[in-house]
Amino acid sequence: NMWQRAVTALRSQENKTMLLPAQLDYRALTVSPVDAQIIDMTKLNRSMIAGIFNVPAHMINDLEKATFSNITQQAIQFVRYTMMPWVANWEQELNRRLFTRTERAAGYYVRFNLTGLLRGTPQERAQFYHFAITDGWMSRNEARAFEDMNPVDGLDEMLVSVNAANPLNNFKDTKGKEEKNDE
């Protein structure tokens, strides 16, 4: 109760130093050197565990050196350098055990699709799809499929930017039409 009165009095007077009543003792809120070493060892242990299993530190909740911008890159590196070797082994083993030689020769296979894990940031994906669509090697519906979106009628047509078009093809098409019109 005495503490509450002191705090209330302090709040009513701005920029004043708080004095403790005589009955209260001040204790510093510090960490002893032993406790500080334990905290450092805990951080080291988390870092070592992440290193042993080749897992980014942010995936075991060690966010000390993580930033929003580098977590995406760390996640992509995790897929490439930690998951891919395991996935390749699993694919090979499943293909060997599930399919006969004849079935493998006919084109049957097991493949894990990790594309979703390698997507990157929305800005990177938008730029990738933009170039893929305007350069004419991906349709708009294919880009939608990568983003788990339903296809839309009329978006299967391949687009090519004007700068990438072959002007001779346009000239041949135009010349052929002119000759037909002359007849």
Image (tube, rainbow, N blue to C red):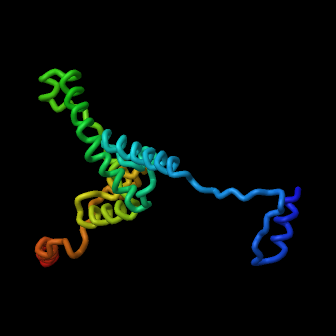
**Side (left or right) of 69 relative to 35:** left
Quadrant in the rendering for residue 170: bottom left
Residue 83 place in picture, x, y as percent: 29, 41
Q: Which residue is at the front of the view, 125 or 60?
A: 60
Quarter occupied by the C terminus: bottom left
Q: How many marks?
A: 0
Q: Which residue is at the front of the view, 148 or 183?
A: 148
Residue 25 place in picture, x, y as percent: 76, 57
Residue 1 place in picture, x, y as percent: 88, 56
Q: Is residue 111 among what the camera can see?
A: yes
Image point 86% across, 70% down: which residue?
A: 9
**Side (left or right) of 146 relative to 4:** left
Quadrant in the rendering for residue 129: bottom left
**Side (left or right) of 175 relative to 85:** left
Quadrant in the rendering for residue 95: top left
Q: Is residue 141 among what the camera can see?
A: no
Whether 58 is drawn above or below 122: the answer is above
Image point 24% across, 67% down: which residue?
A: 160
Whether 79 is drawn above or below 121: the answer is above
**Side (left or right) of 34 relative to 154:** right
Q: Residue furthest front?
A: 22
Image point 48% across, 48% down: which residue?
A: 39
Q: Which residue is at the front of the view, 75 or 109?
A: 75
Whether 156 is drawn above or below 182: the answer is above
Image point 46% across, 48% down: which residue?
A: 37
Residue 101 place in picture, x, y as percent: 12, 23
